[in-house]
């Protein structure tokens, strides 16, 4: 007898339909799994047979062949346990399961028959809907996550018996309901605020400009000047995600196993802060079976790199292409995967190893050679890709002791949202072609959009020409100066870029020549 169960396998950030075929025939009572399974899938036969017995069912005592199709795609992980078990019980009982025809079944089995959570429930539900399936049966712990997808019924099951009885119509289950739009609007209360930060008005302004235009930002200052404190408050002013962005981000977090029942949907932009000891694979993704790294987990959010020169040079250099392309492609023997990584880079560093170079009150203990070596850990090409370089000086006692609260995150966020609204209207018609992505903010402008929306008058052209000549900026820096100036103009509500806007943008580039 042959039984066929539909399931899915993860490939990058997408899910691919897999047919689990279970067939019995004459021969020794052995279970054979074919279809390019990895070690976890090959071991499933032992978990499955034990779970079937402990759930009170009978499994085939004949030669049983389990085929996972398509056979040329590698199948990974224990998530095929449940479809294999359902197929084996159906074959052993010679039972017809009418609900199997238009249903995805996926889940990991414990030896007791309980169903454990899996990774990638959201992309699996999306794939099921796109394949014209009617329902998805998966672990109860993943049901809230999969229910975000509209147009398909999601059923969460707790054990093998419950799953089988539902498929055989012996038991009815209520589909899990969930609305992505409702979860997106249900924001959480922030426990930090920019009003708590004393002084650093120029740095706050630079952060506002960066968030308004989606620009990369580098903070340079001595220890204790508040660089990390300021960076950790960025989530309180960052613009909210759109529904499409939230679903994109949730899919990545889902395949990384970062979601649970209480946190089944990523409604706020991610803020990732990896330690400087992170490896290339940890940052970009990889391993034998390519998985997303921190740059992809921060997709549509912020990647904060504290103590930037302490990261390995090779680790920083591999970020150059993903920052430009907003995607990272990883090639391994197991295959080639492309993960999205459209993030804002925020970095912080000391001006020298001891941290007090240029400080008027504390003496620097570093030699000129040490300072130069420290700064050369950040290459010119990487620095070119950071739009704003801002000095964060030590805060004076007068500012620290000031009892008047600073401007709140809500006030800053309101200005940022107005600027983003202007940009959304500006780029409304972009991304209509299948080959191009929609431009969402000034930092994402294409060269053609830059020429159209960043025109300068004669005075502005002369000003920028002198700056390029005197400061020896690169062509990439030229583009980024114009993009930042466009954002500053948007914050001011100006249709054109005035010389004042250009001067402020240039002031945020005066550090790159000091780092070479």
Image (cartoon, rainbow, N blue to C red):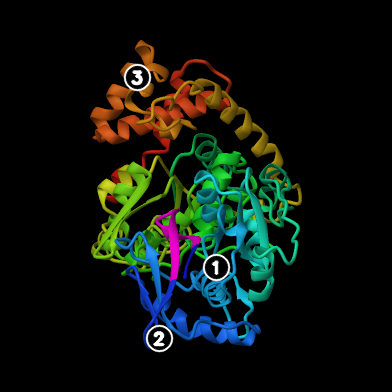
**Residue 202 x, y percent position in the rendering:** 54, 41
Quadrant location of residue 265? bottom right
Can you give x and y, in whole percent of width and height, for residue 392 in the image?
49, 50
Asked whether the beta carbons under mark 3 and mark 1 sit within 8 Å of each other, the answer is no
Q: Residue at x 43, y 45 (%)?
A: 342
Closer to the observer: label 3 or label 1? 1
Q: Residue at x 67, y 45 (%)?
A: 184
Q: x%, y% of residue 70?
A: 35, 59
* Residue topped by disc 3: 451
Local secondary structure at mark 1: loop
Mark whose residue sits in front, 2 or 1: 2
Question: Based on the displayed image, in which of its 4 quarters is residue 312 positioned?
Answer: bottom left
Few, some or many C-alpha atoms within 10 Å of disc 2 (few <14, some 14-19, many ≥20)? Answer: few
Is disc 2 placed on a helix, strand or loop? loop
In terms of depth relative to the viewer, which is nearer, 258 or 48?
48
Which residue does the numbered mark 2 point to in the structure image? Answer: 30
The magenta span reads 5-22
Q: CA distance from mark 3 to mark 1?
A: 48 Å
């Amino acid at each position: 007898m042959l039984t066929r169960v539909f399931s899915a396998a993860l490939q990058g950030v997408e899910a691919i339909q897999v047919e689990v075929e279970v067939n019995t025939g004459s021969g020794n009572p052995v279970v054979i799994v074919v279809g390019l399974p990895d070690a976890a899938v090959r071991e499933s036969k032992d978990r499955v047979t034990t779970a079937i017995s402990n759930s009170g069912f009978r499994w085939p005592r004949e030669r049983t062949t389990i085929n996972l199709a398509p056979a040329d795609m590698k199948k990974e992980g224990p998530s095929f346990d449940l479809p294999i078990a359902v197929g084996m019980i159906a074959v052993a009982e010679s039972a017809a399961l009418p609900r199997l025809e238009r249903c995805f079944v996926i889940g990991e089995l414990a030896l007791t028959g309980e169903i454990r959570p899996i990774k990638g429930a959201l992309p699996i539900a999306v794939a099921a809907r796109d394949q014209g399936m009617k329902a998805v049966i998966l672990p109860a712990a993943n049901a809230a996550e999969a229910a975000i997808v509209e147009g398909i019924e999601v059923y969460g099951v707790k054990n093998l018996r419950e799953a089988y009885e539902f498929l055989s119509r012996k038991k009815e289950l209520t589909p899990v309901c969930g609305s992505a739009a409702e979860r997106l609007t249900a924001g959480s209360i922030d426990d930090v605020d920019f009003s708590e930060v004393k002084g650093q008005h120029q740095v706050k302004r630079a952060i506002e400009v960066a968030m308004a235009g989606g620009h990369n930002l580098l903070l340079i200052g001595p220890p204790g000047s508040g660089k990390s404190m300021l960076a950790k408050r960025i989530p309180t002013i960052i613009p909210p995600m759109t529904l499409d962005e939230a679903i994109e981000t949730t899919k990545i977090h889902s395949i990384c196993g970062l979601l649970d029942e209480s946190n089944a949907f990523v409604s706020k932009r991610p803020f990732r802060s990896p330690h400087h000891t992170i490896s290339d694979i940890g940052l970009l993704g990889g391993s034998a079976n390519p998985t997303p790294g921190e740059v992809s987990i921060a997709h549509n959010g912020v990647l904060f790199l504290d103590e930037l020169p302490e990261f390995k040079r090779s680790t920083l250099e591999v970020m150059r292409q993903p920052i430009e392309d907003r995607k990272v492609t990883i090639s391994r023997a197991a295959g080639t995967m492309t993960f999205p990584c459209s993030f804002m880079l925020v970095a912080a560093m000391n001006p020298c190893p001891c941290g007090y170079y240029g400080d008027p009150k504390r003496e620097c203990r570093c030699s000129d050679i040490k300072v130069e070596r420290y700064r050369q850990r950040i290459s010119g090409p990487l620095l070119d890709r950071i739009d704003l370089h801002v000095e964060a000086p030590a805060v004076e006692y007068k500012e620290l002791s000031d009892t008047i609260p600073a401007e709140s995150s809500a006030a800053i966020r309101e200005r940022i949202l107005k600027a983003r609204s202007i940009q959304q209207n500006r780029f409304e018609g972009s991304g209509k072609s299948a080959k191009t992505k929609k431009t969402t903010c000034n930092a994402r402008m294409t060269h053609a959009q830059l020429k159209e929306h960043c025109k300068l008058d004669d005075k502005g052209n002369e000003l920028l020409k002198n700056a390029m000549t005197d400061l020896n900026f690169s062509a990439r820096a030229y583009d980024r100066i114009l993009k930042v100036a466009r954002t500053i103009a948007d914050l001011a509500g100006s249709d054109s870029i005035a010389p004042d806007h250009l001067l402020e943008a240039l002031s945020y580039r005066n550090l790159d020549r000091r780092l070479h």
